[in-house]
Image: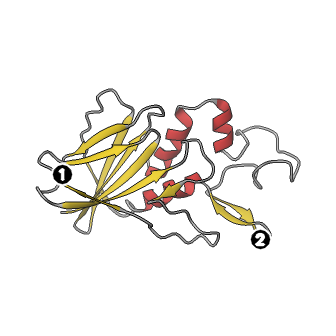
Amino acid sequence: MTISHIWVQVKLCHRSGSVIKAALGGKLPGASLPTPGTTKFPEPFYTPIAGGLNSGFAARPLFYGMMLAGQLAGAIMVETKLDTGGANVTAYAARAAGKLRVAIFNKDLTRAVQVNLVAGRAGQQARLWRLAAPPPDSTEGVTLTGAEAGNDGRWQPARGEGIGRRENGYPISLPPGSAALVFLDD
């Protein structure tokens, strides 16, 4: 299972039918096709990039999940241990080219969580990318590192955060319905 699939499950497993419908571009699978030009989205089914030559193109939420997942592509997955304390949180780790990458997902839609990532060496710095949306069911305003993709599909990280390792690990706070990707040098 890739991280992009996990992000989609975050949006689908814990939401009502109307929110799921919105997340899928205004159509539930198996529903009849709309009359062209009568839906909010130009396509009847969900796609990571939507639009047309006349209206331009826009990245949808899945696009950003795929961008986050792409950071784990080609890496070797490593075991993670997670004490969730009852929160709906998951974590996945992978190693590539001497770097450890840890993806953390707060799937709880009502409460923020504080994660303590135990990895690295004392005093070592890590970089953090955040995947966020105004509310978790947004179809617009979704960002990775605070940056949205341009109409041409180009994306550049805007503001990765630096976090220092404390005595017991890296403290990371995650708002409801968000994710983070941590980059550590081995």
Task: Kindly identify the residue that appears in the image at 55 percent across and 53 percent down.
Answer: 142
Seen as rendered, the residue at the extreme right is: 35
**Front residue of this view, candidates 76 and 183:** 183
Q: Which residue is at 15% across, 50% downward? A: 166
Q: Amino acid at mark 2?
A: Leu
Report the residue at 13% width, 58% height from top. Answer: 123
Q: Which mark is residue 7?
A: none
Residue 30 drawn above or below residue 163: above
Q: Dividing the image into 4 quarters, which one contains the C terminus?
A: bottom left
Along the line of sight, the residue nearer the viewer: 34 or 159: 159
Examine the rendered structure and indicate whether residue 109 appears above or below residue 75: above
Q: Would you identify the image quadrant in which residue 149 lies?
A: bottom right
Q: Position of residue 122 (x, y in %)?
A: 11, 55
* Residue at which label 1 appears: 119
Rendered location of residue 71, percent (x, y) = 39, 62
Residue 66 spot, x, y in % from top left: 50, 57
Which one is in front, 109 or 81? Answer: 109
For numbered disc 1, what is the local secondary structure?
Answer: loop
**149, above or below 5, in the image:** below
Q: Is residue 54 left or right of residue 135?
A: right
Q: Residues within 10 Å of mark 2 (few under 14, many from 20)?
A: few
* Residue ID for mark 2: 53
User: Of the residues shown, which amino acid type is indicated by label 1?
Assistant: Ala
| Residues at marks 2 and 1, CA–CA distance in whole angstroms | 47 Å
- Residue 60 image-quadrant placement: bottom right
Secondary structure of the residue carrying tag 2 is loop
